[in-house]
Image (tube, grey):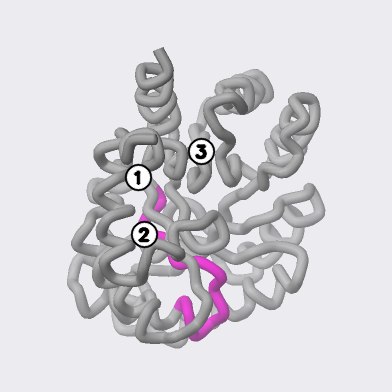
Amino acid sequence: MTNNIQNAMLAVSLMDLTSLNTDDSQASINALVNSIDPKLGTPAAVCVFSEFVDDAKIALANRLLSHVKVATVTNFPTGDAPLNEVLNETLIAIERGADEIDLVIPYKALIKGEADTVLEYVSESKKACGSRAKLKVIIESGELKTPALIAQATELAIQGGADFVKTSTGKVAVNATLEATEIMLKVIKKSSKPVGFKAAGGVKTSVDANAYMQLTTEIIGHDYLAPETFRFGASSLLNDVYKVLNETQQ
């Protein structure tokens, strides 16, 4: 088996297949789930708005894909909601069956120097998730801009109990970059805690995915490239990776 096929198959298994659009509907979520071809590999999760968690669960069950997790977002995309609203959002999403919560930190507060605010959002959200859902913390690295702020946000996420630290919402000008990824992975490695990493926004092709997987292998090691510790947040990546796999099978 060539490296290309192995990498493409691995990329599929690490994917959070995502639809977070203002015009999402039950039909579009069904179409998202129907885009999965189990013969070519299944993603780790699908990520949808909270009101579509039920629809995603049902659509996955109908295709015998209930092992695929369902993730949703909170404080999304601006990071500006009051904490009590964010916690309410979190509890409702978990009641709807969400397995994973992707929380946007109040990153504008961090830029102003309010680190305690960020820590509170993460730690309180972690308490709300309890043992029922994983907490993935979006730091919005493209808006933080500086290596120091990206590193600080990652440290705060880990300190607050994040299961994963995620680059971006995919809704700003600069989303996942290899530069931010390197900073975040080095902070995770230094923490010696079992914290995962998620690159989101802008990872569109198998070539893109390979660059992130190679960097991760160099910093933390190949074993880290497992759904429990590494994810891609993507919408168009699945089609490209499936294309690679289909071409190699012909």
Instruction: Name the quadrant of the N terminus.
Output: top left
- For the view shown, which residue lies furthest in the top direction? 250
Q: Earlier in the sequence, mark 1 or mark 2?
A: 2
Q: Secondary structure at mark 2?
A: loop
Instruction: Where is residue 222? Give x, y as percent.
Output: 39, 62
Instruction: Name the quadrant of the C terminus.
Output: top left
Residue 167's mark? 2
Q: Secondary structure at mark 1?
A: loop
Q: For label 2, count other residues whose C-alpha is less than 10 Å away and answer few (under 14), some (14-19) or many (20+).
A: many
Inter-mark Cα distance, 1 to 2: 8 Å
Q: Is residue 173 above or below residue 239?
A: below
Instruction: Where is residue 143? Give x, y as percent.
Output: 26, 60
Q: Find residue 60 and report its image quarter.
A: top right
Q: For label 1, count other residues whose C-alpha is less than 10 Å away and answer few (under 14), some (14-19) or many (20+).
A: many
**Is the residue under label 3 in contact with that under label 2 (CB below 8 Å)?**
no
Instruction: Where is residue 43? Give x, y as percent.
Output: 56, 40
The residue tagged 1 is 201
**Is the residue under label 2 in contact with that under label 1 (CB below 8 Å)?**
yes
Q: Amino acid at mark 3?
A: Thr
- Let me know if residue 34 appears in the view: yes
Q: Earlier in the sequence, mark 2 or mark 3?
A: 3
Q: Find residue 53 and report its image quarter.
A: top right
Which residue does the image show at 52% across and 43% down from the upper left? Answer: 13
Which residue does the image show at 40% across and 40% down from the upper left? Answer: 6
- Residue closest to the eye, 208 or 78: 208
Residue span colored magenta:
157-169
The residue tagged 3 is 18
Instruction: Where is residue 137? Give x, y as percent.
Output: 49, 65
